[in-house]
Image (cartoon, coloured by chain):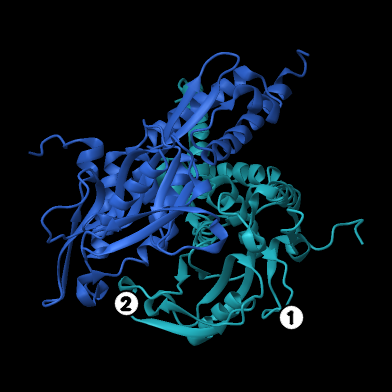
Chain colours: A blue, B cyan
Amino acid sequence: MVKNNDEEVTVMKVRRSDRLVDMTRYLLERPRTLISLKFFAQRYDSAKSSISEDLGILKRTFQDRGTGILETVPGAAGGARFIPYILREDAQKFIEQIIHEVNDESRLLPGGYVYLSDLLSRPDVLRQVGRLIATQYLNQDVDTVMTVATKGIPIAQSVATFLNVPFVIVRNDSHITEGSTVSVNYVSGSSKRIEKMELSRRSLKEGAHVLVVDDFMKGGGTLNGMASLIKEFDASLVGMTVFAEGEFSGEHRLVDHYTSLIKVNAVNPNDQTITAQPGNYLTTVFGKEMGSK
Amino acid sequence: MVKNNDEEVTVMKVRRSDRLVDMTRYLLERPRTLISLKFFAQRYDSAKSSISEDLGILKRTFQDRGTGILETVPGAAGGARFIPYILREDAQKFIEQIIHEVNDESRLLPGGYVYLSDLLSRPDVLRQVGRLIATQYLNQDVDTVMTVATKGIPIAQSVATFLNVPFVIVRNDSHITEGSTVSVNYVSGSSKRIEKMELSRRSLKEGAHVLVVDDFMKGGGTLNGMASLIKEFDASLVGMTVFAEGEFSGEHRLVDHYTSLIKVNAVNPNDQTITAQPGNYLTTVFGKEMGSK
């Protein structure tokens, strides 16, 4: 045994590198899931003590690089759980980058609308949007992410991926392959029209904690409709976050508490300008920055 | 210098571990993107030769674990590019798992439809669906993934994430925030009705290589419509893959070449049974298995 000691050490060294690479991937793909020491020990045919050390390295690196928290649960039944987040600095940089891209007059559409579909179909943008929103609800129970078809879907999916929970899609039109549905009427905040939205009955459980996300909010009517729908299911609303908040000229919005990553205001079809600025995300999630008023 | 040699080695060891963890995350988040040695060398304040060794470890582990290919480009201007794939064995296991979940009579809806929305809104299922479809087009140029609203969107997004390209959403209803659109009429394969679908003009470039995905195919009319739309944009069709293929009682399907992960047939509302089985994905992508006829 003593004779082979050197060789054994070499083998172990190689193994540690491989373990680190594979454990990183494994944990990143399963956010918020407790993976046991035992599982990793068997997967890599290694001692639990070695796995513990590996997890220490992952934890430190994830923290140093702002990737997320690796919660380690001690003891024989212990393991690790990866909770992705974004640092304020990175969130701010991303929001600034988005604002820069949105401030482009070629995005102006008739009626003061802004074309954003290209941004919300880019994997790099969606990944960051999902990471930002997941960070906001880091310490809250979320069982399901809810959105309304069509353009909220990619955001819901990205947030759901970081929170590792399913998402549900509310629709304005009924669809035969959804089975029985529950519907609510709601007042569109901007047009004041009565609309209807519905959700497949089997897609949401009673008592579920639901996070609502959407791409764009004007008067808040759609968000408000989703809040009613959540009540119809006897589920509870955790929070509401939208990618962009538009200018609203009405008296007051139909929702009080919401978070927006960016605010698109002063869309001016006359002089063809768009002014995007940060929404309330950064102060809501990270508080006021030191030095700011 | 000699005196500090031991310490230096220790420091380097720690650094390698940290680099491996962070490089793994960095590359996984940016599939198909060449990351230069220089970038990593600066990021970790390390020699390019050390980075090269790190990449060798990643490459080996990714291969051993069936995570994907790490293409390494040699030379001073070189770097690495991560190309995710799935092994036949893992793909087969996933398809079997899905079939097991689909074969559940409580999924039966009136008219012989099958409820699948829960599966296609689970991040774990969508990740694997995306990985499978991305593997099929591993060696092909894909600039954009196309789907039709609503239920194809999560699949398109997942595939687009693995291919690291944007996706576009074709709609049956026009939407004001999309700007000018191009539309085509198409014949629904199952109902034989004439329908219309449209896509925002600015969302697809001339000459783009487009991969079409959807959740469900019956007669193939929708897929066929998307193929026409691609022609209207002077773009080219790379391929068509659907999550599930349903039973089709018509004369012939409107598309010839398509791939399906699963086939849901013999949906029988009388005796309340569903029979799901593998689609043509495994043989299309991996060829016939040795030993099978």
Disc 2 designates what residue?
A: B179
Is label 1 on the same chain as label 2?
yes
**SS for dot 1:** loop
Disc marking residue B234: none
Image quarter of the N terminus of chain A: top right
Residue B142 in sight in this render: yes
Mark 2 falls within which chain? B
Q: Is residue A188 above or below residue B212?
A: above
Q: Is residue A39 above or below residue A128?
A: above
Tell me residue B46's x, y (percent).
45, 40
Q: Amino acid at mark 1?
A: His
Badge 1: how crowded within 10 Å, few (<14), some, or many (20+)? few
x and y, in percent, of residue B60 in the image: 66, 44
Instruction: Say which of B208 and A258 sits in front.
Output: A258
Q: Earlier in the sequence, mark 1 or mark 2?
A: 2
From where the camera sits, is residue B71 visible? no
Looking at the picture, does residue A64 appear above or below residue B91?
A: above
Nearer to us in this view, B272 or A227: B272
Looking at the image, which residue is at 31% across and 71% down? B177
> How far apart, in angstroms, are the residues tagged by discs 1 and 2?
36 Å
Front position in the image: A161 or A100: A161
**Picture coordinates of residue B203, whole percent (x, y):** 41, 74
**Of marks 1 and 2, the one in the foreground:** 1
| Image position, residue B5 (x, y; %) | 49, 24
Q: Give the secondary structure at mark 2.
A: loop
* Label 2 Cα crowd, 10 Å radius (few <14 / some 14-19 / many 20+): some
Q: Residue furthest left?
A: A293
> What residue is at 16 percent from the left and 60 percent from the top?
A247
Find out whether the residues at labels 1 and 2 contact each other: C-beta distance under 8 Å: no
Q: Name the amino acid, label 2.
A: Gly
Q: On the image, numbered disc 1 is attached to which residue? A: B252
Using residue B207 as the reference point, say whether residue A113 is left or right of it: left
